[in-house]
């Protein structure tokens, strides 16, 4: 019986895809967090202005 030697090829396509997904998810989390932080400030300013108007 002959032993077969298999060369393991590194499939970099899957790793690259996972890296892009991780980058996209971290970027979206940062954008959501920034929107919440800035958005709350704008809501307070809008409420202050609307309350100051007669």
Image: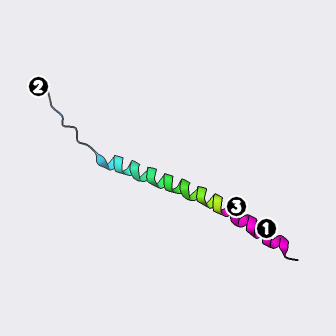
Q: CA distance from mark 3 to mark 2?
A: 70 Å
Q: Nearer the viewer, mark 1 or mark 2?
A: 1
Tell me which residue sits at (22%, 38%) in the image. 8
Q: Earlier in the sequence, mark 3 or mark 1?
A: 3
Q: Which residue is mark 3?
A: 40
The residue lying at 75 percent from left, 64 percent from top is: 44
Q: Position of residue 24 (x, y in %)?
A: 47, 55
Is residue 51 covered in magenta?
Answer: yes
Characterize the local packing of mark 2: few (<14), some (14-19) or many (20 or more) Cα atoms within 10 angstroms: few
Q: Is residue 2 above or below residue 22?
A: above
Identify the residue under disc 1.
47
Q: Which residue was labeled with disc 2?
A: 2
| Quadrant location, the C terminus | bottom right
Sort mark 1 into few (<14), some (14-19) or many (20+) by Cα contacts within 10 Å. few
Q: Tag 2, which secondary structure? A: loop
Residue 38 horizontal side relative to residue 27, left or right: right
Q: Quadrant of residue 46?
A: bottom right
């Amino acid at each position: 019986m002959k032993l077969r030697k298999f060369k393991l090829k590194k499939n970099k396509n899957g790793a690259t895809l996972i890296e892009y997904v991780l980058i996209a998810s971290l970027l979206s989390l940062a954008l959501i967090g920034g929107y919440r932080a800035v958005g709350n400030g704008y809501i307070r300013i809008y409420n202050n202005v609307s309350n100051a108007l007669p």
